[in-house]
Amino acid sequence: MLGKTAGALFWMARYLERSENNARLIDAGFRIALTRSSTAAAEWKSVLVTAGVNQAFKSAHGDYSSARVIDFLLRDPANPSSILSVIRQARDNARTARTALTRETWEAVNTSWMTLVALLKRQVREDDLPDVLTTIRQQSAQVRGALNGTMLRNDGYHFALLGTYLERADNTARILDVKYYLLLPSVAHIGTSIDNVQWETILRSVSAHRAYRWLYGAEISALKIAEFLILYRQMPRSLTFCSERMENHLNELQRHYGEETDARRMAHALVHDKLNAPIQSIFDGGLHQYVTGFLRDTANLARQVERDYRFVE
């Protein structure tokens, strides 16, 4: 496969996953802002920080009002990470890789783009926001279903899934970091009802609230939630689950091309070294430091994938 096509599949999947992740972030911010109206501005700022667009927002807007933040994250053309922007980039990459996609996958991507363009044509009212976010998540799920249900398990499939899990791991890590390092008002609040409400909201933002309850019951603790989102192998948005899938897809690509790569070695080290420590030792060393190190490792891995498979000739 040409490096340009491989890169297009990789980034198509990353942008599609990013659209869903951003919808989940908006939902989390909206829920927290509704329950804690006195600190709504701080909650919306934390969402922008997680999405990596706080500086861009500050340069264009003077305050963190719900309406402005929501519009910026959903549809502002000045925000390259807005949902409308990333779904357009996903569609452009799918068009570049059109010959490597099944008809069903291409149609799902194209339909998702057309649906969201129509949905986000005008500013979304807060009353309509939950339904809009649900539609965004559903569109992403339909593309994922078409890809998993119709694509050959060839190199194109593995590049797409590699992009999906890399983006998902990055998002979960960012949510964890913002929660523990930025979102909590003070260390004095750790373990209080305020802290517990925030942790529950973070679980909901990664669709993990019910799964957590099945595993741990009613007890809400920072240690258990961090363990669940970092180390639990059966949780499909945990750092370990995503990293193991990245290693698996890089293993398949290595077998396909018959060539050992630095990216595969980096993914192996991530799974077997970085994610092989008990949660208490992670907390003892500092959760923020651990998560920022993980984000640095995954960013380096993404760049190495681009080099190894010559996405840019």
Image (cartoon, rainbow, N blue to C red):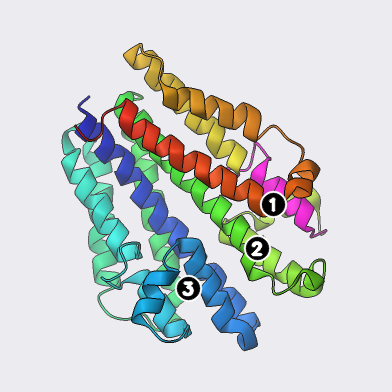
The C terminus sits in image quarter: top left
The N terminus sits in image quarter: top left
Q: Is residue 220 left or right of residue 125?
A: right
Q: Nearer the viewer, mark 3 or mark 2?
A: 2
Task: Report the residue marked by disc 1.
Answer: 287
Check disc 1 and report its element: helix, strand or loop.
Answer: helix
Q: Is residue 152 left or right of residue 70?
A: left
Identify the image quadrant of residue 233. Answer: top right
Q: Nearer the viewer, residue 202 or 213?
A: 202
Of the residues under marks 3 and 2, which one precedes in the sequence? 3
Task: Report the residue marked by disc 3.
Answer: 130
Disc 2 to disc 1, how far (Cα)?
8 Å
Tell me the crowding category of disc 2: few under 14, some 14 to 19, or many 20 or more residues within 10 angstroms, Cα based.
some
Q: Which dot marks residue 181?
A: 2
Q: Which dot marks residue 90?
A: none
Of the residues under marks 2 and 1, which one precedes in the sequence? 2
Magenta segment: 219-238
Q: Position of residue 112 (x, y in %)?
A: 29, 56
Residue at x-position 50% and y-position 48%: 170
Residue at x-position 62% and y-position 56%: 176
Amino acid, disc 1: Leu
